[in-house]
Image: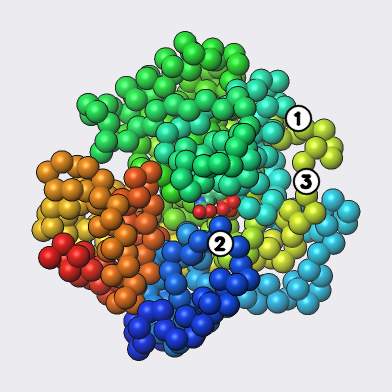
């Protein structure tokens, strides 16, 4: 990786209990002012962040292995991104692209056409959040095909709005008591190599899905099939090789729009610009957000020109979609990703972490599976021998890591997966320290 000049010392420093007194005071104010329905996985309030560290309001310096859920890949205060943001904000922070368009939006669309898989003619529309991108990808697919059914998968996560809740698999905390849900969503079995009853190949798992769709829905009813190439919130599930290509091929042959939800996997995270590239899959539509803009809220749907241009003028949009400051941040972020060669960097981080995680699995016996790609890696925590999920231990390990100054996130349908999503600009030394702390936290919790 190109040498990076960090603004903050890249060190783990824990000088108070976590949360410290200032975080605790803010937590009390928060409780009286912020809705209880918004959770936070870490009880410390941030004051600053740079490279691989988050500094809290008590002066502790925590190692960030979460990147705000795969967002701050170029760092949370990347100087080039910060400069682009202030430069744009100093001129205009908003006009509304639907009223007075501006070049930043067009430039982002051009970038995405070039970066996303496939050399077909593409169009892009910009939004504010991943959920909004997914909602709109479904709108586009339904209008363009004149069909209504949408196929989603077990363990899927696509957002918290009404339609995306319906697409999301997990009830608690995302869906329970928030219904009724949007209709015409059909859920199919995922390829989950670690938990598939018999070890299904990717092709067999895809055949199981295709047979269910054809017998239960009929291909002609299906507007779209939406899938995360590596499932994120559902547990960093990497489908068996062949699963995605066979589904994509079937979709193409049957006029079904294949939507890759790359909100979490996109933008160098997995060691490629997009995770579908690992299997040579070219989606019809791709949804993106998170890593795209260095922390600014921006999301996109990019895909086949004939699908996006099928929508009548005025059919897509929103007040803030493709906000000029967010677009400026995205352009600077993409430049940084190229300049720092962050796809290569993600693979370097994988090469550092994988052997350590595998050794930890062999040593402790409570890690059933080590998986992921690039800087999107996970360990699935289970009861030794049985493979039954152990969400209690998982939570305890994440908490123990935090006490020692490392922020790690959990995920998974069964709440038993610890995921690593470090900023791609984290230094080797700090990353290794973070991994060692995680190992120590696990050893302590099973002792
Ligand atoms: N699609 C694949 O991962 C967001 C959400 C965490 P938004 N994932 C993190 C939470 O508890 O809310 C996500 C995703 C995939 C869509 C989304 C939704 O993106 O920007 O959060 O709306």
- Between the C-alphas of marks 3 and 1, the distance is 14 Å
| Residue annotated with mark 1 | 310
Percent coordinates x, y for residue 438 in the rendering: 26, 67
- Between the C-alphas of marks 3 and 2, the distance is 31 Å
Mark in the foreground, 1 or 2: 2
Percent coordinates x, y for residue 107 in the rendering: 71, 56
Q: Secondary structure at mark 1?
A: loop
Q: Earlier in the sequence, mark 1 or mark 2?
A: 2
Q: Residue at x 25, y 57 (%)?
A: 393
Q: Secondary structure at mark 3?
A: loop
Mark in the foreground, 3 or 1: 3
In the picture, measured across the screen, residue 307 lies left or right of residue 78, that is right
Crowdedness near tag 2: few (<14), some (14–19) or many (≥20) residues, C-alpha within 10 Å: few
Assign the N terminus to one quadrant of the image.
bottom left
In the picture, measured across the screen, residue 343 lies left or right of residue 98, that is left
Camera-side residue of 191 and 233: 233
Percent coordinates x, y for residue 304 in the rendering: 65, 34
Q: Quadrant of residue 426?
A: bottom left
Q: Residue at x 22, y 58 (%)?
A: 357
Q: Residue at x 88, y 56 (%)?
A: 100
| Residues at discs 3 and 1 in contact (Cβ within 8 Å) | no
Assign the C terminus to one quadrant of the image.
bottom left
Percent coordinates x, y for residue 206 in the rendering: 38, 24
In the picture, measured across the screen, residue 307 lies left or right of residue 411, that is right
Q: Residue at x 39, y 32 (%)?
A: 190
| Residue annotated with mark 2 | 36
| Residue annotated with mark 3 | 317
Q: Is residue 419 among the parts visible in the rendering?
A: yes
Q: Is residue 8 among the parts visible in the rendering?
A: no
């Amino acid at each position: 990786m190109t040498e990076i000049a960090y603004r903050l010392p890249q060190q783990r420093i824990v000088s108070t209990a976590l949360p410290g007194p200032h975080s605790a005071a803010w937590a009390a104010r928060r409780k009286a002012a912020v809705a209880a329905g918004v959770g936070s996985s870490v009880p410390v309030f941030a004051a600053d962040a740079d490279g691989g560290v988050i500094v809290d309001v008590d002066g502790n310096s925590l190692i960030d292995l979460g990147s705000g859920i795969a967002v701050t890949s170029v760092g949370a205060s990347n100087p080039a991104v910060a400069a682009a943001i202030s430069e744009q904000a100093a001129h205009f922070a908003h006009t509304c692209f639907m009223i007075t368009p501006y070049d930043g939006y067009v430039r982002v669309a051009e970038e995405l056409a070039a970066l996303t898989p496939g050399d077909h003619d593409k169009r892009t529309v910009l939004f504010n959040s991943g959920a909004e991108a997914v909602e709109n990808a479904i709108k586009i697919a339904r209008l363009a095909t004149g069909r209504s059914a949408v196929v989603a998968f077990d363990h899927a996560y696509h957002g918290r709005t009404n339609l995306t809740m319906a697409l999301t698999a997990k009830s608690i905390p995302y869906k329970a008591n928030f219904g009724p849900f949007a209709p015409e969503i059909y859920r199919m079995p995922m390829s989950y190599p670690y938990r598939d009853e018999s070890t299904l190949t990717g092709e067999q798992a895809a055949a199981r899905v295709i047979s269910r769709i054809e017998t239960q829905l009929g291909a002609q009813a299906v507007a779209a099939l939406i899938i995360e190439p590596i499932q994120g919130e559902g547990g960093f599930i990497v489908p068996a090789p062949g699963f995605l290509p066979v589904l994509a091929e079937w979709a193409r042959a049957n006029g079904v729009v294949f939507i890759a939800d790359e909100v979490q996997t996109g933008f160098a995270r997995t060691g490629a610009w997009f995770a579908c590239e690992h299997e040579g899959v070219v989606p019809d539509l791709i949804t993106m957000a998170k890593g795209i803009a260095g922390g600014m809220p921006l999301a996109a749907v990019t895909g086949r020109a004939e699908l996006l241009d099928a929508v009548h003028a005025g059919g897509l949009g929103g007040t803030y979609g493709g906000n000029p400051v967010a677009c400026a941040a995205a352009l600077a972020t993409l430049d940084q990703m190229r300049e720092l060669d962050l796809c290569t960097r993600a693979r370097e981080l994988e090469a550092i972490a994988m052997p350590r995680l595998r050794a930890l699995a062999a040593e402790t016996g409570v890690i059933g599976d080590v998986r992921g790609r690039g800087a999107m890696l996970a360990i699935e925590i289970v009861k030794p021998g049985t493979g039954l999920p152990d969400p209690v231990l998982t939570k305890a390990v994440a908490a123990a890591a935090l006490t020692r100054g490392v922020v790690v996130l959990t995920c998974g349908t069964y709440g038993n997966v610890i995921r690593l999503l470090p900023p791609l600009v984290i230094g080797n030394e700090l990353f290794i320290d973070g991994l060692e702390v995680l190992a120590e936290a696990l050893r302590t919790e099973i002792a």
